[in-house]
Structure formats: C-alpha cells, structure tokens
C-alpha cells in the first residue's frame, strides 16, 4: 500500500469517528470545515469565523449545558488549555437534525505539530507556548471536533443512576440500623446512646440559631404500685401509654429519651417565645385522660412532668444542669399528683 492510499484510509477512518471536523487558525480565529455530517446540519458550516460558528452552535446546545459550552469555547479558555495539553474536551447535549438532543463530545485538539508524548513536559510546554506567542512566526492551528457519544453516555448515566440507587439503599439501611441501635425497644423512644448523639446536635442548633433550650423531665406516677398490685404487664402498659402521649404532645423536633424504667427526658431547641411547651401540658393531661376513659382498667395511668426553656449557656456541653432544674419542677408536680410516690 502506498503512502497516499494509507493516508486516504486514515482520513476516512477519522471522518467516520467524528460528526464534525474543523480547523481553526489560532492567530486569526478563522475556521474551515473538513467534514460536516448531515446529523448536525442545524449547525452552520458556511461561516469562516469561529465566533460566528459558535453563535450557531450555541442555539443547538441543550439549555442546561449551554453555559458550560460557552465557557469551554471561549477563545482565551481553550487557547490556554491547549498550551499545556494535546487536547481538551467537554461533554454536552446537541440538538441534531431530528430535533432531538444527543450526547456529544466537543474536542479541541492541538495541531501545532508538537507531540507531547515524544517530548519532556518542559520541552512541550515551552514549544507550545512559543507557538501561541508567535515566537516562531509559524501559523498555529487546532482541530475542532464533535464526536457522537450518546449511546456510551446513556449507558454511563444508567450505571450512575443504579449506583446512586444502591448507595441510597445502603445509606437508608445504615440509617435504619443506626436509629434502631439508639432506640428503646419497648417504647420507641431514644436510649442513652441516642441522648448523647442528639444532645450534641441540639446544642449546636441552639448555638448557631440563638434559640433557647427546651428540657422536660417526665415520670410515670405509681409504677411500683401498678407492678405490685396488678403485675408487670400493667406497669408495661402504663409505660407504653405515657411514652406514646409524650411522643404526640412534645414540641416539634423534640428528642424523647427513656432514661430509666419510668423516666423520660424531652429536649429540643425552640424560639424563646414559643408556646409549644405550654400546649404540651394540656396535650399530655388530655391524652392520658382520654386513654383512661377508653381503657377500662382497674387502675388509672398518670404522669408528672416539669420543663424549662432557657438560653444556652457559654461553654455548655451537656444538658445536666437543665435536666436537674426540670427534674425539680417535675418533683413539685409529683408531690401533688402521685399518691404512691416514694419518699
């Protein structure tokens, strides 16, 4: 095979790889088309200025990709890129002759006769920059190519979607197990692990937003009497009923912790003038009253509780001080409500 035949074969092969082939003079930014497939006939091929060509190109770029293509085809941008690279590329969606958008790759390819693969990094950069600066006086040109990558890109996007779905599934399972590990099995409230984890979050929220800390301590009335008189099943029922009412009545965003057999802690960050704590009082009392009416047990279920709503203190790292204050208020109510209280 002679050289002409070989070059013709190579040329045909290159044309088959790209939907558009254009040469750009990087001194004048004049352009001339080598090949222009019919799929891209929306894009003008009868212009001699690269700027005019880009105006026609932009109109056929998907709106979501247009800004990226404008930046990529900026003369200063791709000229600088080619000073250090053999080629640079950008993936986008281009509207073709059938009015549908297809994924394509736009490529600027260094055509200065400088082969980076055969030169050291410093030699290549020096040679390329010299061409750009016009030091050699030689005309510097680059290739502008558009390649159809739609099938490959759609497959890639599908694989990415599947990977994201799998990651989300694993993430959801981890979150589920994480939450399960921090919850009390009997009541669904948080355990002490959950208390520590969410205390840090609530303190951070109060610190960043200026909100106050709401801390409430609640205690089931007469648990020992229920267990001794009616059995532990009655005590378990009472614990479940009180925890359920606390979950329903607590201010929005509250974390509810079972800190002991019949003891609960509620806490969150609230606006300093929030009315939710006062409303919680009514909800708890009303909820337990309705529960006792609907469940004809030989005993009544009740609870005592106390809460505070105070600003975050400087350097505060836990809720211990505020828990003691809320606990003292709870005890005041317990003295009045729990005839079976100890001590």
Image (tube, helix red, strand yellow):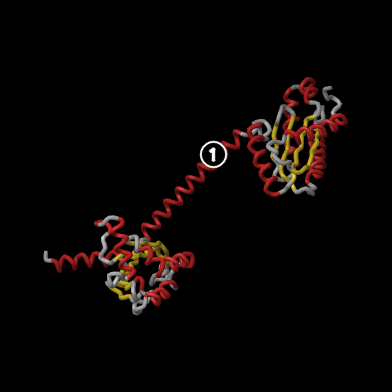
Q: Is residue 257 left or right of 228 when viewed as pictured? A: left
Q: Position of residue 273 (x, y in %)?
A: 79, 49
Residue at the far front: name it.
135
Residue at the location (42% across, 63% down)? Answer: 92
Relative to 152, say whether 33 is above or below.
below
Q: Residues within 10 Å of mark 1 (few under 14, many from 20)?
A: few
Residue at the far right in the pictured view: 336
SS type, badge 1: helix
Observer able to see residue 42: no
Q: Is residue 177 left or right of residue 212?
A: left
* Residue depicted at 77% across the width and 48% down the height: 272
The image position of residue 78, as x and y in percent, is 38, 66
Determine which residue is flagged by label 1. Answer: 174
Foreground of the two, 127 or 207? 127
Task: Note whether residue 114 is visible.
Answer: yes
Q: Quarter of the image for the N terminus: give it.
A: bottom left
Q: Residue furthest top?
A: 228
Residue 47 sits in quarter: bottom left
Looking at this view, is 252 or 325 the one in front? 325
Please, is residue 228 above or below residue 335 in the view?
above
- Image position of 299 with respect to 108: above or below: above
In which image quadrant can residue 294 be found?
Answer: top right
The total of numbered circles placed on residues is: 1
- Quarter of the image with the C terminus is top right
Foreground residue, 329 or 176? 329
Would residue 144 appear left or right of 312 to someone viewing this image?
left
Question: Residue 274 at what x, y percent from top left?
Answer: 78, 48
Residue 292 % position (x, y): 81, 34
């Amino acid at each position: 095979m002679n050289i002409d035949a070989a070059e013709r074969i190579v040329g045909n092969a290159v044309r088959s790889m790209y939907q558009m082939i254009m040469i750009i003079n990087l001194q004048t930014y004049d352009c001339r088309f080598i090949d222009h497939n019919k799929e891209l006939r929306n894009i003008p091929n009868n212009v001699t200025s690269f700027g005019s060509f880009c105006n026609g190109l932009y109109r056929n770029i998907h709106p979501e990709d247009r800004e990226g293509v404008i930046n990529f085809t900026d003369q200063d941008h791709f000229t600088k890129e080619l000073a250090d690279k053999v080629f640079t590329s950008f993936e986008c969606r281009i509207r073709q002759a059938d009015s549908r958008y297809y994924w394509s790759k736009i490529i600027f390819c260094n055509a200065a006769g400088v082969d980076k693969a055969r030169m050291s990094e410093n030699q290549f950069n020096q040679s390329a920059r010299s061409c750009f600066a016009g030091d050699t006086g030689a005309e510097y040109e680059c290739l502008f190519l558009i390649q159809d990558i739609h099938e490959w890109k759609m497959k890639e996007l599908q694989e990415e979607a599947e990977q994201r779905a799998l990651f989300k599934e694993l993430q959801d399972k981890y979150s589920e197990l994480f939450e399960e590990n921090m919850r009390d099995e009997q009541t669904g409230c948080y355990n002490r692990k959950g208390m520590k984890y969410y205390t840090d979050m609530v303190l951070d929220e109060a610190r960043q937003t200026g909100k106050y800390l709401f801390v409430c301590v609640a205690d089931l009335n007469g648990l020992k009497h229920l267990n001794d008189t009616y059995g532990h099943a009655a005590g378990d029922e009472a614990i479940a009923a009180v925890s359920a009412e606390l979950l329903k009545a607590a201010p929005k965003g509250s974390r509810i912790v079972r800190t002991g057999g019949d003891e609960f802690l509620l806490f969150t960050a609230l606006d300093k003038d929030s009315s939710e704590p006062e409303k919680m009082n009514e909800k708890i009392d009303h909820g337990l009253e309705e529960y006792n009416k609907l469940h004809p047990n030989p005993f009544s279920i009740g609870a005592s509780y106390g809460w505070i709503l105070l600003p975050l203190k400087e350097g505060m790292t836990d809720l211990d001080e505020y828990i003691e204050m809320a606990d003292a208020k709870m005890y005041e109510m317990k003295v009045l409500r729990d005839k079976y209280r100890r001590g």
